[in-house]
Amino acid sequence: MSFTLSKSRYCNAVQCPKILWMHKYMPQEFDSSVLNEAVFNTGNEVGDLAMGIFGDYTEVPYGDPGEMIQLTQELIQAETPVICEASFSFKGLFCSVDILKNFGHNIVELYEVKSSTSVSPIYVDDISYQVYVLRKLGYDVRRACLIHLNKNYVRFGELNLRELFTMVDLTSQVNDNAASVESTIEFLRGYMRKRREPQETIGTHCFSPYHCGFFPHCANDLPHPNVFDLKRTQLNTRMKLYESGFVSFEDLYHSGKLSDQAATQVRYELEELPDHINIPKLKEFLTTISYPLYYLDFETFQPAIPRYDASSPYDQIPFQYSLHYQKEKHGKLYHKEYLAYPYEDPRRNLAEQLCKDIPENVTVLAYNMAFEKGRIRELAALYPEYAEHLLNIHDNMKDLMIPFQQRHYYTRAMHGSYSIKYVLPALYPDDPELDYHSLEGVHNGAEASSTFLQMLSMDHDTLEEYRGYLLSYCKLDTFAMVKVLDRLYEVTEQ
Ligand code: SF4
């Protein structure tokens, strides 16, 4: 079989050559859950926008590679100054250049667009591969640059592409990398001739720069659970444990190298231990709760390209909240909510409604309150007219995550996590009312964000249907908090 490569597959192979081999010979083993459609869509959106950074351009439409290469040649011959998706191939090495500046006489500049806000070493490999292909074809690549989003850009009015994007000249790094590209490609030609599955050691390269979709396959021989199932433990720490031979939970149990939290997870997985409930500590936490009590949860989305004035790439934009409240302990449960329509900046209306829905000087409960507090501070900075009230809400927040984060309440079913998505089913197993899986359309925060992003292109009926899904999802988030607090009362009052 002939050897072929694209720039994304080359980057895969730089991460680990076995990824390339697996994609060709055992693609069915790929775990597609590592792919993130939202990230993919963001990349396309940013790429499309960046095409206009040098003014007028001609795009080679995506399609048959042969036709893309042919059209590129025609455009170059016609002295087209800016060509997007310009496509080339040299001995099976294919690449499409995001933006190619064509100066005639085979003199070009190459621009790779990424939706990130910084330079990653893998981008240098990506560009180096493209430059290698073009130089092999005889082009004089004068400059090779990365274009990425500028996190410090703040939108006011029309987007300013020159300010939204940052251009980094990587020509000298790419030139330094040239010999390495050549030797990597030669190595891969031999590697891809292997008929038997290559054996590569598991390492940090399985997770960086990208989480490898073949990890379940390569880790198939490891015992379960294993060191990679440890929650709240840095990857570097897990790798060090793995490389030191502490792989199974039994190994880890005797390693003496675990943090208290990780050791608790391991101990509970291995032994039939009763639930750990520290009543005095839980009571201490509950003394910080007063009534009326408001349970608050925000949903946000992070547009790569700022949609609204006074926002920057990847700002967290709150577009929805759910609010349950009780006037007294064990009292009747009330509910309020806010969900913006996607056509306008949701922040001012949300801030105003939040101030109407939550009076000053009441306790506001959130789960992982750092997130809600961060959004409230941002809203207060944006809208001074609501700042005093918002900051009052901010200052009166309490975090329901604390008892679980500090392991005052721990059960085996939490599997080392204190996320509410683990805590809730651990406290209420098999309760259909609290089962996120039984929701329609939106089941987690990531789906909520992408749903809101997609709403702009929905027709009226579909949009209303998805609004219903969003409202149900966010409502369950705060109802879950009500139930979690109920359980804390229950165990401390027994
Ligand atoms: S899981 Fe690791 S070793 Fe296996 S193919 Fe991926 S990066 Fe390579």
Image: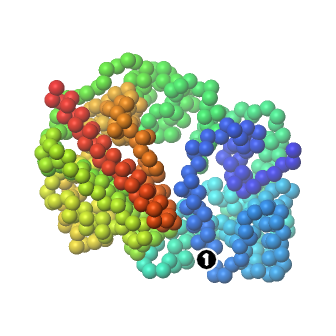
Label 1, residues with CA under 10 Å away: few <14, some 14-19, many ≥20: some
Q: Nearer the viewer, residue 158 or 194?
A: 158
Q: How is the image coloured?
A: rainbow
Q: Mark 1 — residue?
A: 53
In the rendered image, the residue lying farthest to the front is 461
Vertical order, 439 against 178 (above or below): above
Residue 99: percent from left, percent from top = 69, 71
Where, by quadrant of the figure, is residue 174 drawn? bottom right
Vertical order, 334 against 146 (above or below): above
202 vs 234, left or right, is right
Where, by quadrant of the figure, is residue 433 drawn? top left
Residue drawn 30% across the image and 24% down it: 275
Residue 443: percent from left, percent from top = 43, 46
479 vs 329, left or right, is right
Quarter the N terminus occupies: top right
Residue 120: percent from left, percent from top = 59, 57
Q: Nearer the viewer, residue 237 or 449?
A: 449
Residue 390 in view in this figure: no
388 vs 26, left or right, is left
Quarter the C terminus occupies: top left
Residue type at mark 1: give it.
Ile
Q: How many marks?
A: 1
Residue drawn 41% across the image and 44% down it: 439
Residue 383 in view in this figure: yes
Residue drawn 69% across the image and 78% down it: 57
Residue drawn 54% across the image and 56% down it: 38
* Secondary-structure class at tag 1: helix
